Image: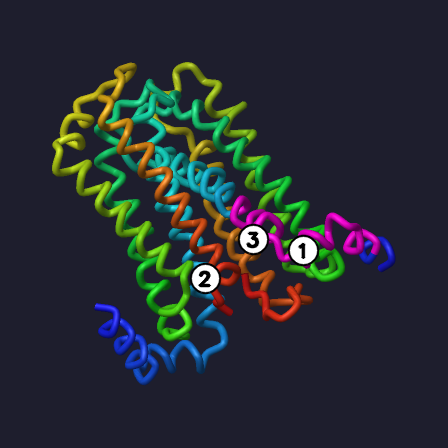
Amino acid sequence: MPFLSWVEGLSLSVWIREGGSIWGYPTILFLHTVGLGFLAGLSVAMDVRILGVSSGLPLIPFTRFFRFMWAGFWVNAISGVLLLMADATTKAINPVFYIKMGFTAVAIIVLILLRRRFFNDPGLDQHAVSGKGKAMAVTSLLCWVGAITAGRLMAYIGPVAGLPGTSNHF
Amino acid sequence: MYTFLEHFSQWLKTTGPHFFVVQNAWVVPACQTLHFFGLAMLFGMVGLLDLRMLGIARGLPIGPINKAAPLWGFAGFFLNLITGFLLYAGDPVQYFHNVAFRWKMLFILLAGLNLSAFLITGTSRKVDTIGPGEDAPVLAKLIAAMSLFLWIGVMYWGRMLPFIGSAF
């Protein structure tokens, strides 16, 4: 596709992919991992609390962690776009990439719903967690499992991007 | 120690785990995927405890987090120990000579020492009594900041395996 070739040929994309700089592909990939740690890591820890682990912990204060999750999300949105640009002709036609985006989109929608519909209840810690709350936590957990799995398998299944001289199973 | 580890890595190439990894193409991607699950579990729990000790979400008592952290965090750690061992067994000599891999192991060791300091100095026991709204002692904050730095460092060196080192 001409559009994808054009994106991949942009000087920014070429620099990320072939510049050989530690600040290009390697650092962007590292930032994508740290973002995963904050976004999926904290989200999953919150989900298992909602599902009943450590029920001695009040739920309301967990809202304070949302800004760290959103920070992780934006780091990954930006680093993800850069990684996609660098390998547009392969990643953007890989079905596994769209599976990853599907899982991620649902995980993010559930996170927003948790914040707006679940955590907005001031009496949250006075009663048992609702079935809806638990359903959202389970959905969130499953979506992160799906997103991480699909993300990892993008290096193995479908059209796989390749840095020159490597098999690129990053 | 150096020669011992080198011999160990060479010997590993003659063992069952090595052949299991190299003869089944699905093992490496599966291990890498599980390695990222472990990462999210470990870093999520470590992050929760460390951020709370640093003063984020003060409404949470620290005791219950500190009680849940070992089970959940170590589950992630052991998952990564097993999958990491299999990935190492698949290409032991490469990993042995990989600079980024040595840094990663050093950072994991330092994170372990940091955890030992948390336990030995009695900081862990002290923070157990810290209730909602209360501040953690300075030493707990130092250990928390060090822990975040070291685990992010572990991720850094893991990601640098193919770039600074020569994995894959």
> Looking at the figure, which quarter contains the N terminus of chain B?
bottom left
Q: Quadrant of residue B13?
A: bottom left
User: Do circles 1 and 3 both sit on a common chain?
Assistant: yes
The subunit carrying tag 2 is B
Tell me which amino acid carries mark 2.
Gln
Q: Is residue A14 magenta?
A: yes
The residue positioned 36% from the left and 29% from the top of the image is: B51
Task: In the rendered structure, find residue B17 and report the number of the disc placed on it.
Answer: none
Mark 2 residue element: helix
The kind of residue on which mark 3 rests is: Pro
Cα separation, mark 1 vs mark 2, equals 26 Å
Front disc: 1 or 2: 1
- Residue at which label 2 appears: B32
Q: Which contiguous range is marked in magenta? A: A6-32
Q: Main secondary structure of the magenta part?
A: helix
Residue at 39 percent across and 50 percent down: it is B154
Residue depicted at 67% across the width and 47% down the height: A82
Which quadrant holds residue B134? top left
* Badge 1 vs badge 3, beta-carbon distance below 8 Å: no
Q: Chain of mark 1?
A: A
Query: How many neighbours does mark 2 have within 10 angstroms: few (below 14), some (14-19), or many (20 or more)?
Result: many
Instruction: Measuring from the top left, give residue B58's x and y in whole percent.
Output: 33, 19
Labels 1 and 2 within one chain: no
Q: Nearer the viewer, residue A130 or A96?
A: A96
Residue corresponding to mark 3:
A26
Compared across the picture, whether B34 is left or right of A72 comes to: left
Quarter of image, res B70: top left
B113 within the magenta span: no
Q: CA distance from mark 1 to mark 3?
A: 11 Å
Contact, mark 2 vs mark 3 (Cβ under 8 Å) = no
Label 1 sits on residue: A19
